[in-house]
Amino acid sequence: MKSSIATWMHQRPKIRLLALLAAPGLWLVVAYLGALGALLITAFFTIDTFTGDIIANFNLGNFQDMLTDPAYRNVMLRTLGIAISVTFICGVIALPMAFFMAKVTTARSRKFLVALVLTPLWASYLVKIYAWRSMLEPGTGVIDWLLRPIGIHSPGFGGPAIIIGLSYLWLPYMILPIYAGLERLPNSLLDASGDLGARNFYTFRRIVLPLIFPSLVAGSMFTFSLSLGDYITAQIIGGKLQMLGSVVYQNFSINLPFAATIATIPVTIMALYLWLVRRTGALASL
């Protein structure tokens, strides 16, 4: 009897921890996984074109229409290309910015620069995108006004505008993980590399980049997933171009099963991306 009581007293902290984790875990299962499961199930249903009612008749017609229609394939490839481009651009811009913040500037200036990086996140999403719309306006926009003297015009509205807008929106999500990774990087490694005669690029390629690779992966997960599911930017500055999110938005009220079918594409792509990331072991190093 005493041994059982002692065992219960010993396990009480673990039981208390499990009880605290039960509520968030339940919320994750119900609100996220439950909604995702309902979405995937709805994708196999059809809709009555006359009444608009959903018919719970399991079939693969929606997937067949999605895969055989060249228009939807083009939208999928375009969205994937935009997401990859945004992730690459954010990585190229974020690396030198994060390195300067973490290793070059002083400790006092570092806090100020981090605050500046976070400042755009306080502004409204729509305000920022409409600001870019006014700047990208052909003929009257700020970009056209600045670049016209050197013979370059604004890209206008379309694919390049979407990439520019999304890169601006999600850049802080790439800078902050890389900055956190660089802060943990000991300066002694950089000093030792320089003392042994390694050039700056060689030090970056062989020492810095492998050590901050998990941080790069963490940032890419944000930028890639957010770009993959975006549709508001495409509607405002994308011109006539559509992304997967735009197709989902257009079909949501008129054909929910087909909208759910289109929504499975970014979910599948992200699941495959996370699987590839997990194979690299980067997630375990975060």
Image (cartoon, rainbow, N blue to C red):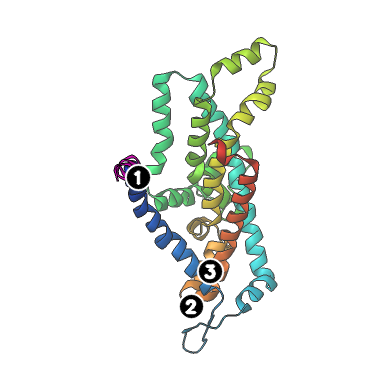
The answer to whether residue 165 is left or right of residue 31 is: right
Name the residue: 40% across, 43% down: 121
Give the numbered dot on residue 40: 3
Q: Residues within 10 Å of mark 2 (few under 14, many from 20)?
A: some
Residue 195 drawn at (x, y percent): 65, 10
The three-letter code of the residue at mark 1 reads Leu
The three-letter code of the residue at mark 2 reads Ile
The main secondary structure of the magenta stretch is helix
Give the numbered dot on residue 254: 2
Separation of marks 3 and 1 at Cα, in angstroms: 33 Å
Residue 8 colored in magenta in the image: yes
Q: Which residues are magenta?
A: 1-10
The three-letter code of the residue at mark 3 reads Leu
The secondary element bearing badge 3 is classed as helix
Name the residue: 41% across, 56% down: 28
The quarter of the displayed image where residue 189 is located: top right
Separation of marks 1 and 2 at Cα, in angstroms: 46 Å
The answer to the question of whether label 3 and label 1 lie on touching residues, with beta carbons closer than 8 A, is no
The answer to whether residue 275 is seen in the rendering is yes
> Is residue 60 or residue 99 the one in the foreground?
60
Separation of marks 2 and 3 at Cα, in angstroms: 18 Å
